[in-house]
Image: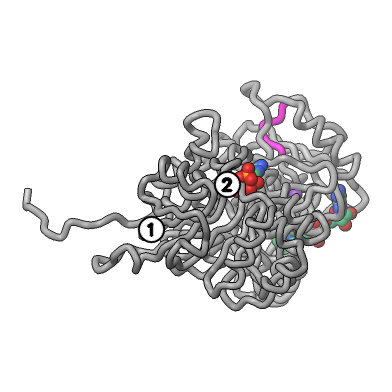
Amino acid sequence: MRKAWRVADVRAAEDALMAHLPEGTLMQRAAAGLARRCALILRNVYGAHVTLLVGAGNNGGDALYAGAILANRGAAVTAILLDPARVHEAGLKALKDSGGRTAEQPPRTVDLIIDGIVGIGAKGGLRSGAAAALHKAQGRRGRHGQRPTIVAVDVPSGVDVDTGDVPGKAVQADVTVTFGCLKPAHVVGPAAPLAGEVELVDIGLRPWLMADPAILVPDRKDIVNALPKHRPTDEKYTRGVVGIATGSKTYPGAAILSTWGALAGPTGMVRYAGGARQYVVQAHPSVVATDRITEAGRVQAWVVGSGLGTDEAAATAVRTVLASSLPVVLDADALNLLVDGTMADLMRGRSAPLVLTPHDREFARLAGEEPGPDRVAAAQRLAAHTNAVVLLKGDRTIVATPSGQAYANPTGSAALATGGTGDVLAGLLGSLLAGGLRPEVAAVTAAYLHGLAGREAARQGPVSASDVAAALRPVVNDLRPGDQENVVTPK
Ligand SMILES: NC(=O)C1=CN([C@@H]2O[C@H](COP(=O)(O)OP(=O)(O)OC[C@H]3O[C@@H](n4cnc5c(N)ncnc54)[C@H](O)[C@@H]3O)[C@@H](O)[C@H]2O)[C@@H](O)CC1
Ligand SMILES: Nc1ncnc2c1ncn2[C@@H]1O[C@H](COP(=O)(O)OP(=O)(O)O)[C@@H](O)[C@H]1O
Ligand SMILES: [K+]
């Protein structure tokens, strides 16, 4: 897992580390890493035109020192000082000593913009002077007529570093070079896409980060490790059976999509219980279907949710699975039914795993308030209140546990923002739960695979939920080691 830490924890670690180092060492390390990445982007540093947007703090200092390194290598470096009275003096001297200059306006040619406006000391969106300077620099063209590349120092300026919120104007970076560790704004909320590609430069901070990370971000290896492996002795029941109670005669599509998602998961069998049974069996002949949950036979986890409606039969379905001692995923309509107080008691009283998968509007109904600017904290509050793992959907889907652990999903695609993709996700998640994964691991794994499937589907053109469901199987296959031949014929 990659890890992101909040500003207060980063500052505490920096203070502890700096106490052991000569003054300025950390900034030199940061600037060296920043300049290295800028040089890679420019390819030919000699003769390149670099504009620094320099704010009042150490973030501006990093930009000035990196500018000095690039100027020493023959770049024409111009610094726009946004608050000249509070500029990092030593950084400015280094830049000037290396042949860089300051100016009120960006020069005519700009290949690279280094955003050193504000870093982890940011408050609110970009102030007007900074926004105007950025706008002008972005309007310039490079030596070859290209748009300038924007490299953000530490974070794209204007974002809320601890929450990933973007409260006003902010920099849209191509690359963000960050120091010591990731911060929440790199991985959650609308800030994350503004960071572009994030490069983490090691400045020796990690051993000094004593606090727990605020957010964990799974990578491919974590997902490969989480996926259950087929054992030679497996039969269908040992792989787990997932029960799907979604859809209805009115909404058979939801049932087809969620069973499709479940079929891509690790379980040996998918059972369906509900009003859309004929449609489901027609679409997926391997699914064993009944009308009611109570008739479905044994399963190791239930998914109840979308297309179910909110009538008495739907409420009974939710009550039945909540009263069971099995892991449960509640999605869509089932979440709306939870607002009823009797359900809430059943939910909080459970000891078996429960995963709730709201989008923002479902979250608002359940929690009584919008997720707001701090999506991680919002998901954590709902998880604690409901004693359930909460998977809050969105561009960077968040998974929060009742004990306060938070994960951010790094995969995904805006192409997933289309009707029915959530049904596919819920089915897959149910299969992973039935396959024996811990609820937060199942939720993180499902979101990751679903995001990859969304990307894969988007490569083929406009995306429907069926495309995402169809893309899931090859995506899962790609991450799970296949069966090996153990008798090999010598060539
Ligand atoms: N502390 C350290 O040891 C290190 C810090 N480093 C750099 O230092 C940065 C933090 O430096 P600072 O604590 O000086 O803080 P910043 O440089 O992030 O911000 C300082 C000033 O920016 C202005 N500002 C705040 N919000 C703004 C907004 N929305 N628009 C425009 N201006 C705004 C304020 O005047 C504030 O005092 C890090 O992000 C990183 O780039 C690195 O050099 C690595 C080492
Ligand atoms: N802008 C976006 N970028 C990336 N993923 C998104 C975006 N909007 C929605 N998604 C994803 O698409 C899925 C939509 O699910 P949901 O809102 O339940 O839709 P439905 O109910 O139609 O199935 C979720 O997995 C969510 O994380
Ligand atoms: K910045």
* Extreme residue toward the left, this view: 490
Asked whether the viewer can see residue 56, the reply is no
Q: Is-magenta flag for residue 112?
A: yes
For image coordinates 29% across by 65% down, the residue present is 235
Residue 88 position in % (x across, y down): 82, 54
Among all residues in the image, which is located at the extreme right?
85
Q: Are marks 2 and 1 in contact (CB under 8 Å)?
A: no
Identified at 69% across, 53% down, the residue is 311
Residue shown at the point (69%, 59%) measured from the top left:
184
Question: Mark 2, mark 1: which one is toward the viewer?
Answer: 2
Provide the residue span drawn in magenta. Answer: 109-113
177 relative to 274 in the view: left or right: right
Asked if disc 1 is less than 8 Å from ligand 2, the answer is no
Quadrant of the rendered structure where residue 305 is? bottom right
Q: Position of residue 119 (x, y in %)?
A: 77, 54
Quickly name the residue at label 2. 248
- Helix, strand or loop status at disc 2: loop
Tell me which label, 2 or 1, sits earlier in the chain.
Answer: 2
Is 38 magenta? The answer is no
Image coordinates of residue 218 in percent, x first then y, are 54, 60
Q: Amino acid at mark 2?
A: Ser
Residue 105 in percent (x, y) is at: 84, 32
For residue 269, which numbered disc appears in the image? 1
The Cα atoms of the two marked residues, 2 and 1, are separated by 21 Å
191 or 286, which is in the foreground? 286
Q: Is residue 464 visible?
A: yes
Amino acid at circle 1: Met
**348 or 314, which is in the foreground?**
314
Q: In the rendered image, which quarter is residue 299 located in?
A: bottom left
